[in-house]
């Protein structure tokens, strides 16, 4: 359950202009090391202390590095915020346009990933460097709703001279963090920002509510994925002798056999095929299944539980490519798209692995097309789980891979125009 926010920046019944003048005097005195005429809100005072200790210039902030276009695309993909982007835009983009604000979505480091809303306000934001690809963390621009919400983990509204950097005093912003309900991990923040004259306590309430809706959508998607995994887990467990659970990649249990019901198990951070110690279960054998893991408890005969390595057969004998997986507990198969068949073939014939740039050159003849490669590999990893490692991309070292090719070498991946396929 989300904790309460720090509350609106403008006291109830207070004149905004009068309060802004007071905040300016408080800011000036604090920056000068003098006794201010009033105390800033506790959350603002704590933030000012943090940013002063980091040497942030109160006049200009710190110059951040603008992400390259490919870096921005990669951060968008990896942040997890793209899953709730349609909801956030649907709830806030129109409001931002109508109220002379802009809606901003960031990753957990404060980098702006998407920006929508008033054209005029976006032009003003451009002058501040408040643009897609720039970091708006406290360590770059000082106290602001985005950076401070990410530090505290709570929704916050920042008004006028509550911003530490003076060039931001003409702005007000309200931001709320968004967490992944599966792991509790901070994904990023959603924010409404605009001219200080647009300050309203309802802005913070709206942003906080929409962030809660986003987390609720992620929670629903997680439960639906877990239910789908449960459908494939039951037949898998029917072939297992002994105690076992099937989990998703985060350790949430879809089904179990031989043990008391449990909702979640703490998988190792770098969970992979083979033997692992799992708290609450003990010594286990871990095998990949579509969308997660089969975790079998090792009892009296540890060797028998791990006497088979996971085997992978990449069947490319016709145009309907498939991957077939066998392990100690049985087997399963998964159909492959033409692009995924190409990528897995290249990884199979290069067991040492390939970087995204190398795969881009192999598939497209252009090593700069890493964004497309990473997106496809991300989709593959969601389907194939622990069969694949990254950095570099390769089959797991505990997986034995066999490629089944057509009798006619020219019929190998007939759809493919990848240089590394057609040239090899």
Image: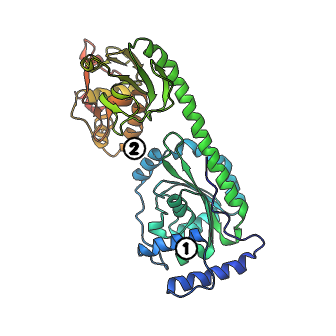
Q: Residue at x 48, y 42 (%)?
A: 183
| x and y percentages locating residue 394 in the rendered image | 28, 33
Q: Residues within 10 Å of mark 2 (few under 14, many from 20)?
A: some
Helix, strand or loop under label 2:
helix
Q: Residue at x 41, y 58 (%)?
A: 67
Look at the image and tell me whether residue 170 can be seen. Answer: no
Spatial CA distance of label 1 from label 2 is 41 Å
417 left or right, relative to 177: left
Query: How did the renderer colour the structure?
Result: rainbow
Query: Which mark is drawn over residue 371?
Result: 2
Helix, strand or loop under label 1:
helix
Look at the image and tell me whether residue 195 can be seen. Answer: yes
Query: Which mark is drawn over residue 45?
Result: 1
Query: Which mark is drawn over residue 133?
Result: none
Q: Earlier in the sequence, mark 1 or mark 2?
A: 1
Nearer to the camera, 160 or 184: 184
| x and y percentages locating residue 338 in the rendered image | 39, 25
Q: Farthest residue toward the front?
A: 300
Q: Residue at x 42, y 25 (%)?
A: 337
Placement of the C terminus among the 4 image quadrants: top left
| x and y percentages locating residue 356 in the rendered image | 31, 41
Nearer to the camera, 183 or 393: 183
């Amino acid at each position: 359950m989300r904790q309460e926010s720090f509350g609106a920046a403008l006291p109830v019944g207070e004149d905004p202009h009068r309060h802004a003048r007071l905040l300016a005097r408080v800011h000036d005195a604090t920056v000068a090391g003098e006794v201010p005429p009033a105390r800033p809100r506790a959350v603002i005072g704590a933030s000012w202390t943090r940013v002063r200790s980091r040497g942030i210039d109160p006049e200009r902030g710190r110059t951040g590095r603008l992400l390259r276009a490919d870096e921005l695309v990669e951060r968008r993909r990896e942040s997890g915020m793209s899953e709730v982007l349609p909801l956030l835009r649907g709830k806030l983009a129109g409001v931002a346009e109508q109220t002379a604000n802009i809606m901003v979505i960031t990753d957990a480091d404060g980098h702006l990933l998407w920006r929508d809303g008033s054209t005029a306000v976006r032009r003003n934001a451009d002058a501040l460097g408040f643009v897609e690809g720039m970091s708006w963390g406290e360590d770059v621009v000082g106290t602001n709703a985005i950076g401070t919400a990410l530090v505290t983990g709570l929704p916050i509204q920042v008004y006028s001279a509550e911003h530490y950097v003076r060039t931001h005093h003409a702005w007000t912003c309200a931001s709320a963090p968004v967490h992944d309900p599966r792991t509790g991990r901070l994904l990023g923040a959603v924010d409404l920002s605009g001219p200080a004259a647009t300050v309203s306590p309802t802005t913070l309430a709206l942003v906080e509510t929409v962030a809660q809706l986003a987390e609720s959508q992620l929670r629903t998607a997680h439960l639906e994925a877990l239910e789908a995994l449960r459908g494939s887990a039951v037949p898998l467990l029917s072939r297992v002798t002994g105690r076992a659970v099937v989990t998703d990649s985060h350790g949430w249990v879809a089904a179990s056999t031989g043990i008391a019901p449990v909702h979640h198990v703490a998988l190792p951070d770098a969970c992979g095929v083979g033997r692992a110690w799992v708290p609450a279960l003990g010594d286990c054998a871990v095998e990949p299944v579509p969308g997660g893991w089969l975790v079998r408890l090792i009892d009296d005969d540890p060797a028998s539980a791990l006497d088979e390595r996971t085997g992978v057969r990449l069947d490319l004998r016709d145009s309907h490519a498939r991957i077939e997986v066998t392990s100690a507990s049985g087997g399963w198969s998964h159909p492959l798209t033409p692009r995924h068949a190409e990528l897995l073939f290249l990884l199979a014939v290069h067991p040492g692995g390939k970087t995204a740039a190398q795969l881009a050159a192999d598939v497209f003849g252009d090593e700069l097309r890493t964004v497309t490669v990473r997106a496809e590999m991300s989709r593959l990893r969601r389907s194939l789980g622990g069969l694949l490692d990254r950095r570099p991309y390769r089959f797991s070292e505990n997986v034995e891979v066999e490629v089944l090719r057509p009798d006619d070498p020219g019929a190998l991946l007939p759809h493919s125009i990848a240089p590394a396929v057609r040239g090899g």
